[in-house]
Amino acid sequence: MDFIISAILQGLCFSSMAIGVYLSMRIFNIPDITTDGSYTVGAAVTATLLTLNWNPFLVFPVVVLVGSLAGAMTGLIHTKLKVHPILAGILVMISLYSINLKIMGRSNIPLINSETLLDISVFKTVLLNESFWIVLVVFLIVMKFSYLLKTDFGLTMRATGNNEKMIQAIGVRTDNIKIVGLALANTLTATSGYLMTQYQRFADINMGVGIVIVGLGSVMIAEVFIVIFKVKRISIKLLMVVIGTIIFQMALAMTLMIGIDPIYLKLFTALFVLLIVSLPKFGLISFKI
Amino acid sequence: MINLLNITHVFNKGQSNEVKAINGLNLEIPESEFVVLIGANGSGKSTLLNLIAGTEFPTQGKIIISGVDLTHAPNFKRSHYVARVFQNPTDGTAADLTIVENFRLAALRNQNISLKIGLNQKFEQAVKDKVATLGLGLENKIHQPIGTLSGGQRQALCLLMAVWSDLKVLLLDEPTAALDPKSAEIVIQTANQLIRDYKITTVMVTHQLKEAIQYGDRIIQMQEGKIAHDILKVKNPSIAMTDLYELFA
């Protein structure tokens, strides 16, 4: 039971990042893998500031700032220097490795005595309290982004990934839209780092390795549901991404539960994503990859 | 309305494959005139349209629209003046977005884009009413992704979207070339209707000489980057397709 609950909470922590991946890969059609770095930078900033006894509410804006800077950097390299987005993302991700080490000062920071967001007492039991804060943050993110995507600005964002030429013809600088969009996506990713660090009570320089695959897998599970249930409303789509992330974490928890060596966790993550992306090939379901 | 002064446009300047697409062209188009550009492939008519649209900039010369010098203004800066309908309807619409969302985007052409929800009930109703005037029965499908419609339907909607908010110049880039004859007929008639109703200054590129004669006020035939013939319909009311065909010889 504990296993399942912790998989759900971990899934919720990751869901912000998965929404970020959904934003960049699906709405913008930009394969952005800055994610691995911006997740860790969110974690590094959170752990470092919390050990300096910062209030967790004040840590959050800093996380938002560094996340958006990372994304904007990838966006600038891609749009202004005309570098392929994958390469732009790798460059920023690799640079962030050094920056994260510099921020943290060492490769691992445990949060044993620091008060985290999840420690702020609302309910009596620890579990309920942790769940409350994590669910609240995820709920606010889903609400905020479903609103954003419905606004005129959001409409322009969605259309930029669809038909850039048309959007330029209506007088929009699509470069700017892409930079803002990547900044938003990586802010979401950094927010996942912020939540996860406080949930697992440590930050590690390598915690972001392969995290973009977790996001991608979660988004694809979500898309299976979006196709099956013919979801049209953007808020429900984002909710599906959250559910997709939880299912993904559950699946990984199951593999551990049946006694598979944790060493193979990343291998199983990759195999699981491979399985999902190959579904259309077997004619089981059709969605774009 | 549109003044093109001594325009020259050279591709690959200074290289062995240098091409003078436009060569010292002068053209004045008065307000609400419907100009049709015809000419052989490579005669420079598409380049001329790109120069007016601002997706390319002339090597020499000036482009003045509605009294404003827009020679070097990129396309997103002249969207207040110029709207364009592309040859391929997929270029003018965002396929995964619904009809009404596409119209909302078109409505943003002359506005600052804000963090407000502009796609409200009132806007939806306005789109429904406008779309109904096309007589294609699309007013009941406004929440359908526009990519699910046929090319002709999409192109008709593109025209309607182009004239949704104020514009000075409408550019039509072979708007019927990708369509079957029946859809082409509907689209060109819709275009003509909108152009006359709203008195829009229009430049259309086409290979369809019949369209040129039937709908244009003025037919300009281009050759090697220059205007070879400039025919005003009011002065030559009896001009026939064979006459135009002769010009290509």
Image: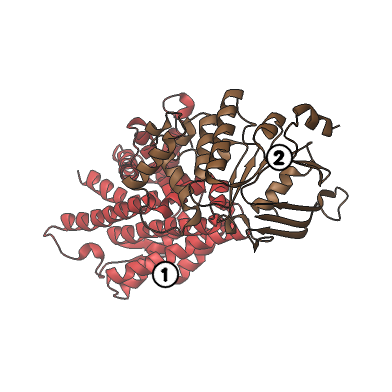
* Point 44% across, 63% down: residue: A68
Q: Amino acid at mark 1?
A: Met
Marker disc for residue B234: 2
| Pointer 1 chain | A
* Point 68% across, 61% down: residue: B72
How many neighbours does mark 2 have within 10 angstroms: few (below 14), some (14-19), or many (20 or more)? few
Rendering coords of residue A257 (x, y %): 29, 40
> In the image, A250: left or right of B146?
left
Marker disc for residue B50: none
Rendering coords of residue B61 (x, y %): 77, 60
* Point 83% across, 49% down: residue: B20
Q: Colour of chain A?
A: red
Q: Amino acid at mark 2?
A: Val
> In the image, B7: left or right of B135?
right
Q: Which chain is brown?
A: B
Quadrant position of the N terminus of chain B in the picture = bottom right
Q: Quadrant of residue B142?
A: top left
| Pointer 2 chain | B
Task: Check whether the beta carbons of the residues at disc 2 and disc 1 lie within 8 A of each other.
Answer: no
Rendering coords of residue A10 (x, y %): 30, 50
Rendering coords of residue A249 (x, y %): 32, 44
* Above or below: residue A267 compared with residue B115: above
Residue A29 seen in render: no
Q: Which residue is mark 1?
A: A104
Quadrant position of the C terminus of chain B in the picture = top right
Question: Looking at the picture, do discs 2 and 1 lie on one chain?
Answer: no
Q: Which structural element holds mark 1?
A: helix
Q: Which structural element holds mark 2?
A: loop
Q: Disc 2 versus disc 1: distance between alpha carbons?
A: 79 Å
* Above or below: residue A185 compared with residue B42: below
